[in-house]
Structure formats: structure tokens, C-alpha cells
Image (cartoon, helix red, strand yellow):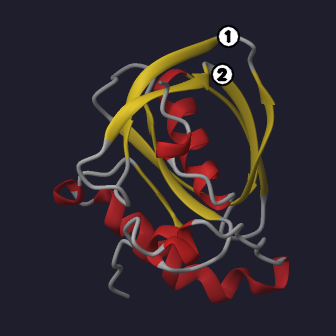
């Protein structure tokens, strides 16, 4: 399955709130999930996260690269189905963000430094993880896509 990233011109999909994947539908989204993982693992695509709406699918699926604790230059790529941020720290940080769907646009965005996120893996197993630092920023960015929010909505003035 070849993926094409939607850009800001396609507001109808990027601004829509994505629908959850039902447990009985998980098998239907395996090809999409594998294609998203392959896309993010390819260094020429220069992405660290991807949400299904960015490839034209209005479902709550994201792929994120989380920095390994021991080596910040290496990432673990994780597929999250129906991710839900269940806790955000009060401590915030501001950093520059960019997006595959907004090529050439960058801006400073404030995010929680630490989050707790729950999701399903491709087999339907419930997962839960506390994520901090850059990884927390990536997950929040991709979950925003699932809610129809783009980074330009969050740029600090």
C-alpha cells in the first residue's frame, strides 16, 4: 500500500475528528498500519510521526517515534490505535514543531512535558505508557491530528 501525505489544502480530512477503530475492525486496518510504519521508518520521508488522517483515512491510528532513553538519536516506532491521553503534566515546554502536512511551516508550540497515553496495539491488546520529553510532544502532535487540530492552530504569537 503506497501512502500519500495530505497537505493543508485538503482541510476536509485534516480538520475532521477521526472515528475510533472498532475491535472487530482491527484486521481491516493491518495493511494501513504496516504502510504507516514503513513510511515512518524510511529516513527519506523525514517524519517522526504520522496520523491516519494525514494519509486520507479518518480513523484514530497513529505511528510515533519515541526516543530511546539511552540513545536520543535512536527511536522505537510504535503503532497506536485509538490513542487516548489520560493525563498531562502541568509542567509545559515550548519547542519548534513542523508537520508533514504543512511543508515548510514551523512554529513554537507549548506542550505538556509528560503524558500518560492508552491505546490498542494491532492485536487489540490494551497498552499504557507514561511518556516524557520529545516523545510526549510527538504523541500530542499526532493525537491533535486525530481531533482535527493542526500545529498552526497552536503556534505561539
Q: Secondary structure at mark 1?
A: loop
The residue depicted at 16 percent of the width and 58 percent of the height is 44
Q: Is residue 8 left or right of residue 63?
A: left
Q: Secondary structure at mark 2?
A: strand
- Residue at image x 49%, y 49%? 64
Determine the residue positioned at 61% across, 82% down. 29
Horizontal and vertical percent position of residue 129:
71, 35
Residue 113, percent across and down?
A: 61, 18
How packed mark 2 is, by other alpha carbons closer than 10 Å (few <14, some 14-19, many 20 or more), is: many
Tag 1 and tag 2, C-beta contact below 8 Å: yes
Residue on which disc 1 sits: 91
Q: Closer to the observer: label 1 or label 2?
A: 1
Instruction: Give left or right: position of 81 versus 101.
Output: right
In x, y percent, where is residue 109?
Answer: 49, 28
In this rendering, does residue 80 appear at all? no
Considering the image in quadrants, where does the N terminus appear?
bottom left
Residue 38 sits in quarter: bottom left
Instruction: Report if residue 93 is visible in the image.
Output: yes
Q: Nearer the viewer, residue 40 or 99?
A: 99
Q: Is residue 5 placed above or below 25 in the rendered structure? A: above
Q: Which is more N-terminal, label 2 or label 1?
A: 1
Q: Residue at x 45, y 75 (%)?
A: 10
Direction from residue 5 to residue 62 in the image, left or right: right
Q: Which residue is mark 2?
A: 114
Q: Quadrant of residue 61?
A: bottom right
Amino acid at each position: 500500500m503506497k501512502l500519500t501525505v495530505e497537505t493543508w489544502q485538503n482541510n476536509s480530512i485534516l480538520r475532521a475528528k477521526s472515528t475510533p477503530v472498532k475491535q472487530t475492525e482491527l484486521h481491516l486496518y493491518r495493511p494501513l498500519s504496516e504502510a504507516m510504519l514503513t513510511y515512518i521508518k524510511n529516513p527519506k520521508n523525514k517524519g517522526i510521526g504520522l496520523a491516519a488522517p494525514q494519509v486520507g483515512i479518518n480513523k484514530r491510528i497513529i505511528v510515533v517515534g519515541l526516543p530511546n532513553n539511552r540513545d536520543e538519536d535512536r527511536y522505537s516506532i510504535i503503532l497506536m490505535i485509538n490513542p487516548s491521553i489520560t493525563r498531562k503534566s502541568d509542567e509545559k515546554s515550548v519547542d519548534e514543531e513542523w508537520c508533514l502536512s504543512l511543508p515548510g511551516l514551523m512554529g513554537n508550540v507549548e506542550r505538556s512535558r509528560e503524558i500518560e497515553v492508552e491505546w490498542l496495539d494491532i492485536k487489540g491488546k490494551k497498552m499504557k505508557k507514561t511518556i516524557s520529553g520529545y516523545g510526549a510532544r510527538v504523541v500530542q502532535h499526532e493525537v491533535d491530528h486525530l481531533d482535527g487540530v493542526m500545529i498552526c492552530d497552536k503556534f505561539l504569537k
